[in-house]
Amino acid sequence: MENKIRVGAAYYPEVWPESEVEKDIARMKEAGINLVRVGEFAWGKMEPEEGVFDLGWLERAVDKLTAAGIEVIMCTPTCTPPRWLLNKYPETRIVYADGTRTEVFSRCHPCKSSPVMREKNRIITQKLGEVFGKKKGVIGWQIDNEIFPYNEGCYCENCKRGFRAYLKEKYKTPENLNETWKTARWSLEYQSFDDVIPPVRSRWEHPSLQTEWIRFHCRNIVSYVNEQADILHALTDAPVGTDMMMTNLLGYYELNEKLDVVQYNHYEPYTGLPATAFAYDFLRNVLDKPFWVTETQVGWNGSMFANCGYRPVGSCYINTWLPVAKGAETVEYWLFRAHPNGHELAHGALYNTAGRAYRVTEEVTRAAKEFSACASFLCNSGVRSKIALHYSSTVFKEAEYAPMLQGFNYREILAERFHKPLRRHNVDVIDTAHALDGYDVLISPFLFTADENDLPARVAAWVKAGGTWIVGPMTDIMTEYASKYTEGPHSFLEELAGVYETYDLPIGNDVYRAKWQDGSVSALDTCFAAYELKGATALAVYDNGEFKGMPAVTEYAVGKGKVIVLGGVPTEEALLRLVGLPPVARASENVALVGRSGKENGIIALETEGKAGSLTLDGTYTDLLTQTTLSGSVELAPYSVLVLKK
């Protein structure tokens, strides 16, 4: 892709008379939109009868868009097969846990195991690839839409057989499965893989069974997506991806392994910008290249009624800038023009049903103009981090079925308590398979399963070479099967960290305090562990309660590096002290900073909370948005951006 930032929206020419497409193109140009996604829900119009294809209307729309300088992401429509297909081949529809097969009522009907569904997907994808694969202006592809194991997956006979075959492949014999899951308790042993009944959330099920059931569906989805990607890769040179949601339950690393670009959809309210920043720091590392935001709300979300809150003045502008600052090369809104009928009537858009712009459209237009003004800086610099934060797909699955802590939300606690305190640092959020080269600090909180992807050996070697591993709380406490260890509370952590865990309390009492070496006292919360020192030193001891005087935070030298173990969740100030690296610059708490480096170098500062902020610069910079020279103390207005070139 050429060096430019794309600002776009989802567009549905199948909804409008062809005469309206040209009017909408004029609106796109007015709004600064240079990219649209098309086709994702239009299978019925592409193939109105089985084997009868009509892509002419779509080709005419694409040609008009391209002629106007608006590029296109073409989508495969496999999220919404037409009614004739679902009715003629009912086996293509998912089955719920109660045994009923879904009726045709909205979207996401298909079973990912159905051979008929797979074949029909291949046919429509092949047709689209043949027509649009080499077409000028089609600069990317999206497979399906927000693909996910909805409703705990499908319970049809194909899926049940596939699940049992998956278990047999993995465990070889029922005896191995029984031993691994310890099914002797409560006399739950399986005599045959045919005895395995898929779990249902409404029942109190074995967490190993639940974890493997969802893991099977995730693997099935990867196969489902890759099947279409293989077809498209043979027909186009444009990047191929699939738009994913904010959850890492369906692992980003696994699903994107054979794809070309990470695509992301989110509908965080304006108060959720810190969690959105966490996602962006994760996305750019999955394939180690710029990512695409393929959907975010413009104004408000909604289906039967509007929800997710209205964005105050300036928030939509920041929502457009934040992903680009963090490494995105595309930002697209859902949707361009509000639908006149059907589902999601209440959803916000850049233009209303009558084709009139909303107030927030002005903010998108402003950001689009600014991206053009500083395209060279944005495209010739990237985000390089010395700090990494683990975010595991394995743990996400385990936390669904064995969270250990009441009300535990894995993504939320990582984003709020470990990532947000580092909002003035560059941070890479990574899964456990990611390489550790180049990082000085690695933070691994609540990494229930740490013994995967050869992480114990890799992290030990990385620490010995000089890295600082800040680990815990509640890290290395489970196998990948959501089972606890029996030889000790951890598989390898105690030995590497020079500690012996004497007590753990998985209850979120907020009464415990830690007294640090300098005499200061601060809270620990969420959960607690106390240690004996086996070579480590105590950075903090408990200052009260039954653990009083016992080590709460420890440090152990390993080669040129060190391992710091957290017994609970520290305060922001304590975490920053443990990390020990300087921020990109000094700034007020409401300002997020992104250091950019490469052929061009500088800082992007974003005020994210709607109030005045400040920044202190260590040198002289040019603000590329105003072409002014700045140094020393700088003020930021509410919801403002500075693009500072060194």
Image (tube, grey):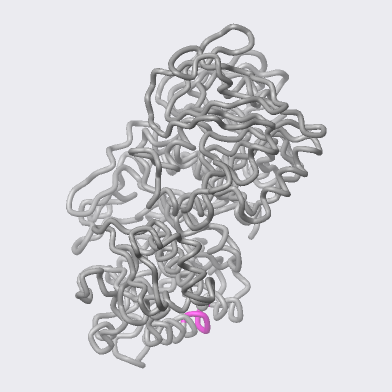
597 with respect to 209 (left or right) = right
Instruction: In the displayed orientation, state which residue is furthest to the top.
Output: 519
Q: Would you place residue 451 above or below residue 561 in this image? A: below
Question: Could you tell me if residue 29 is visible in this image?
Answer: no
Reply above or below: 642 against 435: above
Q: In this view, does 571 lie to the left or right of 409?
A: right
Which residue is nearer to you in this view: 358 or 182? Answer: 182
Span colored in magenta: 128-132
* Quadrant containing the N terminus in the rendered view: bottom right
Measuring from the top left, give residue 371's x and y in whole percent. 56, 43
Q: Which residue is drawn at 54% across and 41% down?
A: 489
User: Can residue 542 be seen at all in this image of the molecule?
Assistant: yes
Residue at (46, 61) in percent of width and height: 181
Tell me which residue sits at (32%, 65%) in the image.
199
Where does the image place residue 228, in percent across and percent down from the top left?
A: 50, 77
Extreme residue toward the bottom, this view? 51
Q: Is residue 199 above or below residue 104?
A: above
